[in-house]
Image (tube, coloured by chain):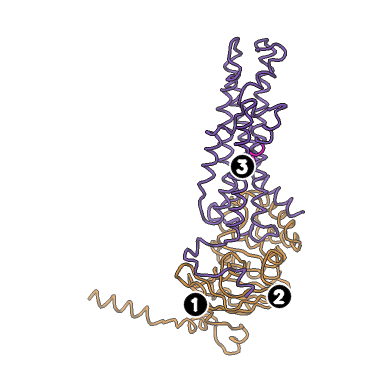
Amino acid sequence: MLEIKNVSKNYGRKAALRDVSLSLPRGQLVGLFGENGAGKTTLMKCILGFVRYYGTITLDGEPIGRRNISRIAFATSEHSFFPDLSPLGHAQFYADHFPTFSRKRFDVLMDFFELPLSVASRKLSTGQKNQFEAVLALSQGADYILMDEPFGGNDVFNREDFYKVLLGILGENETVLLSTHLIEEVSGFIGRAVLIHQGRITGDVSMSDLDERGESLIDYVKSAWNYRADRIKKAIDELDEGAE
Amino acid sequence: MKKHLSTFMLMARFALWPTLAAALLGAAVSAALLFSGGVHGSWDSSNFFDKADYAVTGAVVLLFVLLLRPMRERGGIQPGYTLRRLGVSELTAYIWQSLAAAMGFFICLMAQAAVIFAFALYTQAQDQGPAGDMSALVMLYLSPVAHALMPLSDWPVYIRMLLVCCALGAAASYFPFMNRHGKTAFSPFVILAAAIFGGALRADIGDYTMEGVIGGISFVVIGIYLYAVHYRAADIDDEDDPLGLTGGADSAAQS
């Protein structure tokens, strides 16, 4: 269980996270949704210990440190691989550092995405870099896989394929925390949705609960964020009045 | 152990091409400068290899610049995110990177030494040296450039040069380390300039005071960088939190 308790984080005077509490049990595919600057990336960086924070984050009751950080994988749209190292070199390096690294999964996913094995990773296209980042995270053999906007630069078909592969390969004990803006696109693949707005958790719901209520994920998100559909009409009306 | 070896091999891999480029290019320039001048019948032994001095300096500067590139943030890619998730600490990764860089500087200087040695032998073979069959030995001893690279029995120079290589490696590796933390380090360039203009790549025979000073300064530089990396690695995101309003992950986890 990945437990986040009362986590707050400030960047200077700006609060990025405010008293965030969240539990992530094993074997869930969780969508993390929020507008730009809502705190999604910061939350992941707090989990990984990349930034300081107030509060507590534990993995099976233990603070996250060098002893257990290999149980968490991270795929980010910023990309975190070594630019001068080939994918094949990464596989060897990961195998040395992560005892649970699955070379088989790595090979299958590299083959699936038709990624080259021997070129320097920096030479991959943006879409390929995203795919490679995800391949490394999924092959690490981690219990928790944090994915921060992993699909930027990939077309819709590519993304669809990726979701299906993700569902197909994940073991029952693997948890994915998937941060994305593509709410409708991933709604059919995730089991739970967590909403974050202005640094606060504003919603946490299982997709089965939403199904039972007959509510779509996007409607749930809109209501949780007090989305005002009328503001577009209001703005256009104001513009029209100004023009007359 | 496997993790350490793997980390070192990664760093060595990234230092390999810069080292080869600087060593080969520097040696070629050095050979061109020395051999194109021909063998002199009359010369001052102490400045006989001065032409090679430019090549030695150039090779060291080139290697230093090339070593600033690997393992830093480039094109938006953040290798630091992976380095911080390894079973080895950031300090350990930095030490291995510094060691790989130091070996690069050593190899680069040895390439220069090989050219200078070859030219000394050539001069002796042409019977143009100052001391007959001992000419090569005498020339290598008397020239500050050659003596720094091949101190022969002058063992303090070996220690000093190893320390200089390690200090240059530590300085060159500090730049990408700081870059991974979103900052630019200028101190490596100061260290490089100090090494060049402070005579760290030259050694006068018997001047053990100077050996002690340069060796001591190099040792202190290495120590300062190790402390700085240790401090910075623990001080995770100061740049994000200039007012220090947030607590630390470690302290938070204990609370």
Question: Compared to A113, does B117 lie above or below?
Answer: above
Of all residues, the one furthest to the left in this rendering is A244
What's the chain of the residue with tag 1? A
User: How much space separates mark 3 and mark 2, taking CA atoms?
Assistant: 43 Å
Q: Which chain is orange?
A: A
Percent of width and height locating residue B223: 62, 48
Q: Determine the chain carrying the residue at label 2.
A: A
Q: Secondary structure at mark 1?
A: strand
In front: label 3 or label 2: 3
Whether A226 is drawn above or below B194: the answer is: below
Query: What separation in Å lies between label 1 and label 2 (alpha carbons)?
Result: 27 Å
- The reply to whether residue A193 is visible in this rendering is no
Residue named by callout 2 = A60
Q: Give how far apart the Cα atoms at labels 3 and 1 are.
A: 48 Å
Q: The residue under label 3 is which amino acid type? A: Ala
SS at badge 2: loop
Q: Is there one chain holding both mark 3 and mark 2?
A: no
Residue at 70% across / 48% down in the picture? Answer: B8
Question: Any mark on residue A197, and which?
Answer: 1
Q: Is residue B170 magenta?
A: no
The residue type indicated by label 2 comes to: Asp
Q: Nearer the viewer, residue B62 or B227?
A: B227
**In the rendering, at what x and y percent does residue A83 appear?**
60, 51
Q: Which residues are magenta?
A: B162-166
The chain containing the residue under callout 3 comes to B
Image colour assigned to chain B: purple
Question: Is B246 or A88 nearer to us in this picture?
Answer: B246
Evaluate whether residue B188 shows in this view.
Answer: yes
Q: Nearer the viewer, mark 1 or mark 2?
A: 2
User: Which residue is disc 3 drawn over?
Assistant: B167
Mark linked to residue B10:
none
Quadrant of res B39: top right
